[in-house]
Image (spheres, rainbow, N blue to C red):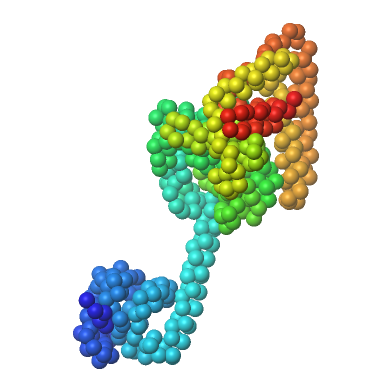
Amino acid sequence: MSALDAIYARQSVNKADSLSIQGQIDLCRQKSGGEFRVYQDKGYSGKNTNRPAFQQMMADVERDLVQKIIVYRLDRFSRSIADFGRLWEILRRHNVEFVSINETFDTSTPMGRAMLNIIMVFAQLERETTAERVRDNYYQRAKLGSWPGGPAPYGFTIGRLPGLDGKPAPGLLPDEHASTVERIFQSYAREDASLGSVARSLNGDGVPAPKRATWDNVALSRILHSPLYVMADEDVYLYYQGKGLIFANRLEEFDGLHGGMIVGKRDRSAGKYQDLKEQHFSLSTHYGLVSSGLWLRCQYKLEANRQLGNSGRGKHTWLSGLLKCGTCGYSVKVNRDKDRYYLVCSGRSNLGLCHSSIQVDLRTLEAAVEAELERLLAECPDVKEHPADGRENTAALAEIDRKIDRLISALAESSDLTMAYINRTVKKLECQRQELLEQQAGHHASPSPKLAHLKFGPLEFEQKKLVAAQFIREIKLSDDTTEVIWNI
């Protein structure tokens, strides 16, 4: 079927002072130089493009069945400059001309193309100002503590809560998943826990993840990083103050009850939680689910994991990052085919610089290295196991040091903190420190602490990586031979 002219007519309601659909068609027919097809929408507004005949016409444009669109007036086609700009891109892509009789608008003429360029400028301006209004409205709602929009985060449902002005506004209410959120924070805060172990525990108990059946590191990390779940107090304020956030609330408003929100434009190429400068923090009207102490312990653990860097990220062996080709020196990667694992020189597979074919069996190599690590660990001095109270005191002392560091970081970023608050906080921390040091001195004086050896076999996968990296500089692989270069 060859391309035809398209006559489009629209009338929302019958009015004495408006041209009827038939009148529009008759006028447009005079501008058609050949065969034409009529598309008409009666009783539809021009505020959007959700009109059946209009949609059919644009579908025919996409199928290259239209060579020219003729309308009586521009607002019959679209009343939105932004919509017109978007639609024109489709017409231009399919070489379709556009004619409006009333405005003497014809894209086949130089004047018509000039008018089109003016319309496109205004279309872009309308899009940008609309986006700016939406963004400003979003920020303003967050600044007032209301839920700014979008789906409710995991553990919450959207309801109505009193805003700062006392009027009900959208807010977050705990749902049936709130207890799972608390479990995630409590589990991850344990010293021997990892994101992987927490995910395995949840999946083993059949707990569904947000939007999918199983949990993974990404889903857990998103929840653990979020300030929506913390009962934000002074320590949370100091934590974020040290990271350079902009606050909508004063320090004294952090009551240890309400959660928080971070909003702001960010560079998507950067890590979401690494650079928070110029982001906006607002206290919310909803109540947090976990204490600030528990939430902060998780933040420090997440930061420590990130600082380990990207080396040795492989999931198939705890020797990742240590395996090197003995021929060219490039790293050796692990490829998996069902239940078999192959060691491949990256200098050969990625760069074509090496001809080494590594025939070493991965599991045999792991077993040999593990046996040697067990022997080395057995020769290490015994580790004193102090009573539980002693370990708790050490952790509490570390937490006090972190609070002081946060206070210093906050002071470096902002002068909003009052000297009265600083003096009061430092005095309280020093008193706590002194009490803990005295308790710790008493524990050290207690007789006969237990002795224990560190065993390699029972360690978690990530823990094995860390221990192996401490003892081994690299493992050179050539054909079927292996050379382990130790750090000792």
> Can residue 186 be seen?
no
For the N terminus, the image quarter is bottom left
> Can residue 353 be seen?
yes
Q: Is 464 above or below relative to 84? A: above
Q: Position of residue 287 (x, y in %)?
A: 52, 40
From this viewpoint, which residue is outermost toward the left?
22
For the C terminus, the image quarter is top right
Q: Is 65 above or below relative to 423? A: below
Q: Is residue 478 left or right of residue 382?
A: left
Q: How many marks?
A: 0
Q: Position of residue 197 (x, y in %)?
A: 52, 29
Q: Nearer the viewer, residue 451 or 84?
A: 451
**Residue positioned 51% across, 58% down in the render:** 138
**Residue positioned 78% across, 22% down in the render:** 437
Q: Position of residue 81 (x, y in %)?
A: 42, 76
**Residue positioned 44% across, 83% down in the render:** 116
Q: Position of residue 255 (x, y in %)?
A: 61, 40
**Residue positioned 73% across, 51% down in the render:** 414
Q: Is residue 285 left or right of residue 23?
A: right
Q: Is 200 above or below relative to 250? A: above
Rendered image quadrant of residue 378: top right
Q: Is 262 above or below relative to 234? A: below
Q: Nearer the viewer, residue 270 or 259?
A: 270
